[in-house]
Every structure is written in C-alpha cells, then in structure tokens.
Image (tube, rainbow, N blue to C red):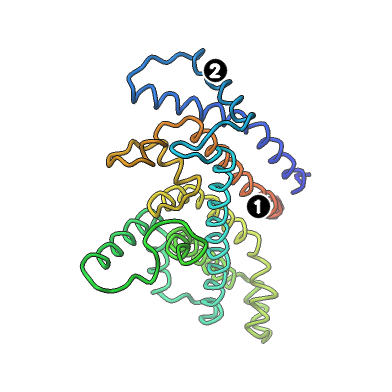
Amino acid sequence: MNHPYIRLLRVGAVCVACLPVAHFFGYLYGEILAANHTQSLLTFQSVVASYIVEIQLLYQGESRIPGSETGFIPGMYDAFVRSLGLYLGAASIALLGGLWSGLSIIRRHRGRLPAWFSTIMSTSAALPALFFASGSIALLYYILIYTTYDLPFPLQGFGWDSHLVVPLIALCLRSLCSISVQTALSLNDEYSKPHIVAVRAKGVHEAQLLHHHVWPAQQQSIIAGSVHELRLMLAELIVVEYLFRWQGIGHHFANAVIAPRMSSIEASSFYASSSVISACLVGFLILSACGECLRAIAIPRHEHDITLAESA
C-alpha cells in the first residue's frame, strides 16, 4: 500500500541523498561559467580540487558572501528565509484565495458558471508571473518618472513590511487564478452527475448540497491540482525575486547565472560564483522537497480513488 507516510520517508531520503549531488553539480556549473567568462582552461581535476577547498572553507566558517564581509552560511541562510517567507505568503494567498473565489462563484451561480468568469480567469491563469512582474515595474517606473504621485508601495528591495505587497501579488496571481478556475470547473462538473441530480431533486438545500455532496466528491482532485500549482510557483520565484530585487536565493541565483549587462558591484561579484550557485540549488531542492511532501499527502488518496473507479 502506497501510504502517505511511506512516501514522506521516501521524499526525505531522496532529498538527503540528492543534496550533496546538487551542491557539487551547482559548483561545477559555476566553474564552467567562470571559465567561459575568463576564457580559461578547465579540467575536472581542478574543479574537484577547488571544490574540496571550498568545502573546507565552509566547514571552518571562513567563506564569505561575494562582495561582502558577511559569512557565507549566515548570509545564505538569511536569503533562504527571505525566499521561504515570500513563497509561503504567496502560496497561502493563492491557495486560500483560489479556493474561496471558486467556491463563491459556485455558491452564487449554483452550477452554472457565467461566461465572464471563464474568459477572465482563463486569461489570467495563462499570464506568467514574468509578464505581471515586468508590467508592474514598468507601470511603477512610469508613475515615478512622469507623475507627482507618491508610490503607495516600495518599487524594489527587501523588507517584511510594504516591500512584500507587489512581489506577493506578482508571485501568487497566476496560481490563484488557476486554482480558482480548477475549483469552479471541478465543482461545476460535479453538479451534472446523476447522484447529485437525484439529491437535488429531493429538495436538499443548495448549501448542504455543495458542502456535503459536491465538495467531498471533488476535494481530493482539487487539492492535488492546487499542490501542483504551488510547485510551479517555485520557478516563478526566481523571476519575481530578480525583478523586484528581493534579496533571496532566487535573486542571488539569477545574479550568479546571468551575465551583468549594466555593471554593478553586486551583479559583478555574484556572477559565476560557484559557491552561490551550489548553495541556491540546495535551497531550491529543499523547497521542492517541501512541495513533494504536500503532494505525498494530498495525491495518493486521489490516485487510489481513480484506480478504484477505473476497476469498477
């Protein structure tokens, strides 16, 4: 039996086994970037030797964030916490907001979705966080340069205050719309099932019909789809952090792999930093493992229900 707790143990074991592998290959990729940038010769033996030295420096606490006097491990830990806070905030808004909006539409229209809902939500769901983030920055820059209007929120930067507003919206918008559409469409399809039609014909109240018959039938599939959307949000985290200069691992990773066109001290020092790339890959692997843990809890029962339905 594929029990959720067994899958959790498997995810944990795979994550622990993959951490050193991800760290080494991240370091190798950084060395390749640096060699291409400086047009120097790179051998596998030299990479292994420099990697051993880097591990020793990390163990001794002598490694530093590029261009800073901050210790490498404390600095990357702070960056991971910033990314985790932004991701959890956006995931919570997307999940709760998407489920609430989908249920609200179903309660109001009782199984008959309006045309405007499908059109607007489908268009919004197809809008990646990249376009929303880029458009938001362009709009805010226009307001800043061509008007005297004071910006209600900071344009870029890190802070556990109003700095969170725009990055949260940019990161959660697509997932919120996708979860809302999936919730509404799944529940709407359930209303046409014969057993729901029979229960409605008995005069059951609409609220009771939704909460006791329609929602339980689609609960697992909706949760599984929502968890999938939250996993996709990890890829958008890099884009949002980079565009809004949120000082997390996504921002550091983008600065480390994207060649700086407009030279700045931060971008130049981070570019092709093997230690930063490897640490960011480890951080993203841990975040992905958290998403896999949610998937392990939500999906097995849904897959088991589908198997039973197909065998019947």
Q: Residues within 10 Å of mark 2 (few under 14, many from 20)?
A: some
Q: Amino acid at mark 2?
A: Val
Whole-percent x, y for residue 9 in the image: 75, 41
Disc 1, SS: helix
Q: Is residue 221 above or below residue 279?
A: below
- Asked if disc 1 and disc 2 are in contact, CB closer than 8 Å, the reply is no
Q: Is residue 219 above or below residue 45?
A: below
Distance between the alpha carbons at the discs numbered 1 and 2: 36 Å
Which of discs 1 and 2 lies nearer the camera? The answer is: 2
- Compared across the picture, whether 279 is left or right of 9 comes to left
- Compared across the picture, whether 135 is left or right of 178 comes to left
Q: Quadrant of the N terminus?
A: top right
Whole-percent x, y for residue 283 in the image: 57, 42
- Compared across the picture, whether 296 is left or right of 65 comes to right
- Residue 100, visible in the rendered structure: yes
Instruction: In this rendered view, identify the residue nearer to me: 108 or 147.
Output: 147
Q: Is residue 118 above or below residue 175?
A: below
Whole-percent x, y for residue 193 in the image: 61, 69
- The residue that mark 1 highlights is 294
- Residue 312, visible in the rendered structure: no
- The residue that mark 2 highlights is 48
In this view, the residue farthest toward the left is 146
Q: Amino acid at mark 1?
A: Leu
Residue occupying the point 50% across, 48% down: 248
In this view, the residue farthest toward the front is 69
